[in-house]
Image (spheres, grey):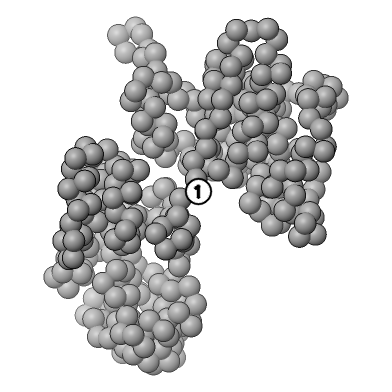
Amino acid sequence: MMLRWLQKTGHKPIVLMGGGTTKVGDPSGKDTQRQLLDDAKIAENLNGIKQVFTKFLTFESVQGGHTDSNAAIMVNNDDWLSQYGYIEFLRTFGPHFTINRMMTFDSVKLRLEREQPLTFLEFNYMLMQAVDFRELNLRQNCVLQMGGSDQWGNIINGVELTRRMGEGREGAHAFGLTTPLLTSASGAKMGKTASGAVWLNADLLSPYDYWQYWRNAEDKDVGRFLRLFTELPLDEIARLEALEGAEINDAKKVLADEATRLLHGDEAAATARDTAQKAFEQGVLSADLPTVEIERAVLDEGIMLAALATKIGLTSSNGEARRLAQGGGLRVNDLAITDGNQLVTAMDLNADGVIKVSQGKKKILLVKPV
């Protein structure tokens, strides 16, 4: 969204794909070494990321014989990182970094304090990211690098390297801008749910589940999220933010609609909204509801509700499922089940051959035997 707003105000976004740095792995915020990916997996991941950015930015397209001056471009750091020989890389950039300073960055310091291994491979990541900024400054006259607050150290290294190696160029200006890692009002990291990450790719998270994520935002977060993740006018956001009681749900639906529309389009947002309305307000099951397949033998034998809720990703643990059930928060075919140990069996299959399992009024999953 930051890149989108900057482009709308006349700036040219440069989306940097980490085809080179992915081969090493960023240790920032990690307790263990990242698993190394092969070239095929890296290419697959980069293609998925590209598809997401095209939803939010306008990329280069020649129309009428000219290209928009602030059209976004996408570059891959493997194009330059893979061209450096080992000795050349060390001689060119090594003198600008001291081990003393590198040891002070959290990505290194925390791993060592916890006596967790940090490989020489990972230790080099900050140099590679710093070189990225210098290369973009030289190639594209890039002057601003943005990222999450966990990237502050890496970005600062890039700023300093670019300034030191400015080679007398007037354009060798470099700046960094970071944003806090987003959390909800309760302190939970955004992007995580009981069932996993909130993906931007439709094949990893359906538009319906994406819509539901925003619909289920905490009341205190609605105004902030509307400002961050939609393009609604500020006076309209102020009006929605002022809603109280049950009316705040109307604001949440607007948030879900607008956020989903930006990522997945108008049609997907409308379908997600209609599916949710039919399921939660009218009790009608839709083919667009998320469906989880489970072995028929499991249902023939019977599975405890708590175990089923965890197995299908409705809850993160059996304990959480039992607590929800005791409070009336788990339903099977719209019937509240207060005992998390109660068995769910093939006898619970409805006329459509599925079992509707819901968590309060927030989430519905259909269980289908295979």
Residue 148 against residue 277 in the figure, above or below:
above
Q: Residue at x 54, y 20 (%)?
A: 143
* Relative depth, front residue between 351 and 356: 356
Q: Which residue is drawn at the image coordinates 68% and 25% (left, top)?
A: 160
Residue 191 % position (x, y): 45, 55
**x, y (%) of residue 175?**
56, 25
Q: Amino acid at mark 1?
A: Leu
Q: Estimate the x, y position of residue 49 in percent, counting from the top left.
A: 48, 40
In-image side of 118 versus 141 (left or right) = right
Say if residue 14 shows up in the picture. yes
| Residue under the point 36% across and 35% down | 56
Is the residue 134 above or below the residue 112 in the image?
Answer: above
Instruction: Provide the secondary structure element on which disc 1 rests.
Output: loop
Residue 244 vs residue 250, the one in the foreground:
244
- Counting labels gives 1
**Which quarter shows the C terminus?**
bottom left
Q: Residue at x 29, y 47 (%)?
A: 226
Residue 90 occupies which quadrant of the picture? top right
Q: Is residue 197 left or right of residue 269?
A: right
**Residue 291 image-quadrant placement:** bottom left
Q: Is residue 78 visible?
A: no
Instruction: Mark 1: give few (<14), some (14-19) or many (20+) Cα within 10 Å.
Output: few
The residue carrying mark 1 is 181
- Left or right of 333 on screen, residue 205: right
Split into 4 quadrants, where in the image is the N terminus? top left
